[in-house]
Amino acid sequence: MAIIVTGASGLLGPALIAALRERGDDVVRLVRRPPRADDEAQWDPAGGVLDPGVLDGASAVVHLAGAPIAGKRWSQPYKKELVASRVDSAATLVRAIEQAERKPEVLVSASGVDFYGDTGDRVIDEDAPAGTGFLPQLCVAWEGAARQAPVRTVQVRTGLVLSGKGGALQPMFPIFRMGLGAPLGSGRQYWSWIAVDDWVGSVLHILENREIAGPVNLVSPSPVTNAEFTKQFGRALKRPTMPIGVPGFALELGLGEFARAALLPSHRISPKKLTDSGYGFAYTHLDQALAAVI
């Protein structure tokens, strides 16, 4: 049976699709342009258009689509795009699922650990409430739209994904290779990370375990402070790092609201649901994960 994937061209989509096909699943990629291959189907998430027949008989839908959080300054129009690209696309999927004659068993929809806001030094699991600010409320709306599907729904709250093929590490590589890597702000904020292989493994685990529902934190069991991340990333690249951090105000001057909302808050997140359900992480320590992706 087919698994439907949105956001198939991003960082996570290709890795997941490769793993699904390796285990023998058929995959249908939803694209916004006319299809160019037999494994593609067209949809218009902004316009709310998706033929329910595309989902008919599928075993699962994995929804990863959304405008990039990083890489652009957050003007008011772009913030609206960040919300619409997630909430409208989830609502389009939900309507198609409702109308499908043979509904998929599960909708796995992306979200982020930004849901919790700044958690300081506290260890947070899936029972914690939403934080305040733009990103937490974006996650609330995103998850709320996906949760309306009349099937099992799972919201995967993903942390910093470590991959050698792009994502958060991509802009960091040249800076650290020049020996200019430095902590951000105080450096005391926690970064909850996950190796891309464990992200894929976690989603496969969720697809196979019908008792898993609701929010699931996709992070390793070993979050580290930004200062420790900086030190270990430099060590993995065999490069020195700067002892003095980049001041928070300088980050905000250069990156705007994104720095204040995404780089400086602390996320000390526990993958409680994953570990309680029996998932075994391939990478539990940052040095192992960085060595693997580098």
Image (tube, rainbow, N blue to C red):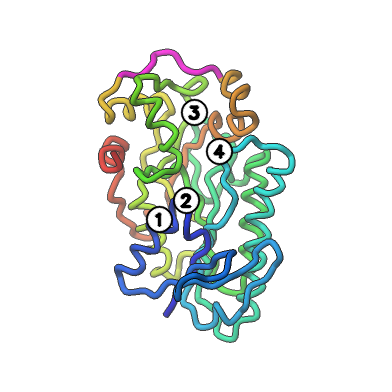
Q: How many labels does the image show?
A: 4
Callout 4 touching callout 2 (CB < 8 Å): no
Closer mark to the observer between disc 4 and disc 2 = 4
- For marks 3 and 4, give the one nearer the viewer: 4
Question: How many other residues sit within 10 Å of disc 2, few (<14), some (14-19) or many (≥20)?
Answer: many
Residue located beneath label 1 in the image: 274
- For the residue pair 145 and 294, the one nearer the viewer reads as 294
Which one is nearer the viewer's eye here, 163 or 228?
163
Q: Quadrant of the N terminus?
A: bottom left
Q: Name the residue under label 2.
A: 217
Which contiguous range is marked in magenta?
240-247
The residue under label 3 is which amino acid type?
Gln
Disc 3 from disc 1: Cα separation: 23 Å
First reached walking from the N terminus: tag 3 or tag 1: 3
Q: Mark 4 points at which residue?
A: 71
Q: Where is residue 183 in the image (x, y as percent from the top left)?
A: 44, 22
Q: Distance between the residues labelled 4 and 2?
A: 24 Å
Instruction: Identify which residue is drawn at 45% across, 39% down.
Output: 168
Q: What secondary structure is found at the residue carrying circle 3?
A: loop
Q: What's the residue at 39%, 70% (across, down)?
A: 208
In the rendered structure, are the residues bearing label 2 and label 1 in contact, judged by CB atoms less than 8 Å apart? yes
SS at circle 2:
strand
Residue that numbered label 3 is attached to: 189
Mark 4 or mark 2: which comes first in sequence?
4
Measured as percent of width and height from the top left, residue 157 is found at 51, 51
Residue 53 percent location from the top left of the image: 58, 82
